[in-house]
Amino acid sequence: MAIKVLAVEDSETILKQITFCLSRHKIKVVTARTGADGIDMYWKNQDIDLLISDVFMPVVDGLEMIERIKRLGYKGPSIVITQNGNKDRIAKAKAIGVSGWIIKPFTEELLRTSVSKTLDIVLKEV
């Protein structure tokens, strides 16, 4: 079964990093640059296995986007990416059922490990 990830990040560089890393492991990555676009992309790709999102984004922030996508029926896991470990944001992320978080800047190894643990799969170093 092919794994499909929706990655939402306003930084083009980080979005490319996520896409490159996961694509190397044969994971299909669909992307969006804002929370609002992430919601639209979910409508077009409701078969996603994992949602990865930045927290701070224009229009709709990542946590609000995750909440909205869950209200639309998404039941899978999610990982948030943030520049700091703000305790209030982490508490809100836990409250809405976020599976994990990654602090920027992050390495390919950290992303691979986080995705592996969240999806309970093995992604070996490539």
Image: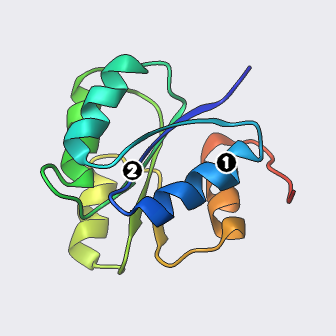
Front residue of 88 and 72:
72
* Residue in the picture at 37% in, 18% down: 44
Q: In front: mark 2 or mark 1?
A: 1
- SS for callout 1: helix
Tell how many labels.
Answer: 2
Residue type at mark 2: give it: Val
Residue 7 is left or right of residue 9, and the answer is: right
Query: Which badge, 2 or 1, comes first in the chain's sequence?
Result: 1
* Residue in the picture at 27% in, 77% down: 87
Q: Which mark is residue 85?
A: none
Can residue 117 be seen here? The reply is no
Q: Quadrant of the C terminus?
A: bottom right
Residue type at mark 1: give it: Leu
Per the image, the residue denoted by label 2 is 98
Q: Quadrant of the N terminus?
A: top right
Per the image, the residue denoted by label 1 is 22
* Residue in the picture at 26% in, 28% down: 40
Front residue of 15 and 120:
15
Contact (CB < 8 A) between labels 2 and 1? no
Q: Position of residue 13 (x, y in %)?
A: 48, 65
